Image (cartoon, grey):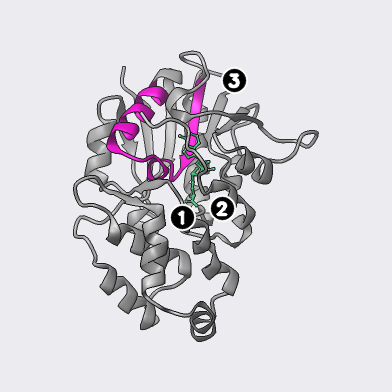
Amino acid sequence: MTIANRDDHWSRHAAQWSHVGPPLRPGSEDIAVARELVAKSGRDSSSGSPRALVLGVTPELVGMEWPSGTRLTAIDRCPGMIGALLPSEGRQGPGGICGNWLQLPFASGSFDLIAGDGCLTVLESTADHCHFFAELARVMTVNGRLVLRLFVRPTVAETPERVIADLQAGRIGNFHVFKWRLAMALVDAQTGAVAVADIWQAWQDTRIVAAELSESLGWPPAQIETIEAYRGASARYTFPRLDEVRATLGVYFDELACPIPQYELGDRCPTLLLAPQS
Ligand SMILES: C[S@@+](CC[C@H](N)C(=O)[O-])C[C@H]1O[C@@H](n2cnc3c(N)ncnc32)[C@H](O)[C@@H]1O
């Protein structure tokens, strides 16, 4: 199991959060899906005031419409992300807890609803994915529901050269799509993992001048600069294939739905609706 991450890059990510966009952050289509799945789960739940847990502090999830009476808690292990992204005390918002998803500080059966965005990718191995699903199954009520957006790599891998060629030919819609395609093209085929620092290095190795790219494609310089948060980062990202995720979660959960969004790279960003196995 990975212990809470040393000097990870999330504090830097927090500082530039406003320049991060879809598909890394959930867009309106993702939130519409999450809201619908959560609303349906809330209607099916026996609890009049569901207890809900957000994994991380993704503002779009925390701030979306939850079933009436929902008691919301958010958990993230990075104090900088909690401080930067959760509504501050005194204003309406969920309670924020600093903790590790792999060792959740909650009793069994504590939550009716759990939602997360891109959580598997920020864990470092398939073993961590397995711990993660086991912990979520433990803290969830028997009729609970889990809504989880994934970042999954394609069955047939792209090469970094192909991704860079598409960037230079103007065939990519925004820098975040490029970053994710590059990251997925760099993963180790066996583990599905890539060192975050290697994503930055591969970008450096292209020798593309950020200002020129910004000028030629009309992308804001600050959007391109978001990749600087990856420089020297000690973390690893994982981009499992969808069949690999299904194999891991299938020990603990049943899959109820898997909508695929329409936006660019949406086929790699499905949202799963899961129910714990009885
Ligand atoms: C919810 S994920 C979503 C990432 C986002 N979609 C992106 O890549 O830009 C990001 C958050 O996960 C948190 N995180 C990563 N691993 C964690 C763990 N094991 N336990 C708790 N929080 C974790 C990080 O601190 C960060 O705030």
Q: Residue at x 36, y 32 (%)?
A: 274
Q: Residue at x 43, y 30 (%)?
A: 3
**Circle on res. 130:** none
Q: Is mark 3 within 8 Å of ligand 1?
A: no
Q: Nearer the viewer, residue 198 or 89?
A: 198
Mark 3 or mark 1, earlier in chain: 3
Mark 2 or mark 3, earlier in chain: 2
Mark 1 or mark 2, earlier in chain: 2
Q: Which residue carries the number 2 mark?
A: 13
Q: Which residue carries the number 1 mark?
A: 232
Q: Residues within 10 Å of mark 3 (few under 14, many from 20)?
A: few
Q: Is mark 1 within 8 Å of ligand 1?
A: no
* Part of the protein shown in magenta: 111-137
Q: Which residue carries the number 3 mark?
A: 48
Q: Are marks 1 and 2 in contact (CB under 8 Å)?
A: no
Name the side, left or right, on which 249 lies relative to 26: left
**Residue 251 lies in the magenta stretch:** no
What kind of residue is marked 2? His
Percent coordinates x, y for residue 203 in the rendering: 40, 69
User: What's the distance in space between the residues labelled 2 and 3, CA to CA?
Assistant: 37 Å
Name the side, left or right, on which 172 lies relative to 161: right
Q: Vertically, is 80 above or below 30? A: above
* Residue 138, quarter of picture: top left
User: What's the distance in space between the residues labelled 3 and 1, CA to CA?
Assistant: 47 Å
Please tell me whether mark 2 sits on a helix, a strand or a loop. Answer: helix
What kind of residue is marked 1? Gly
What kind of residue is marked 3? Gly
Q: Nearer the viewer, residue 269 or 118?
A: 118
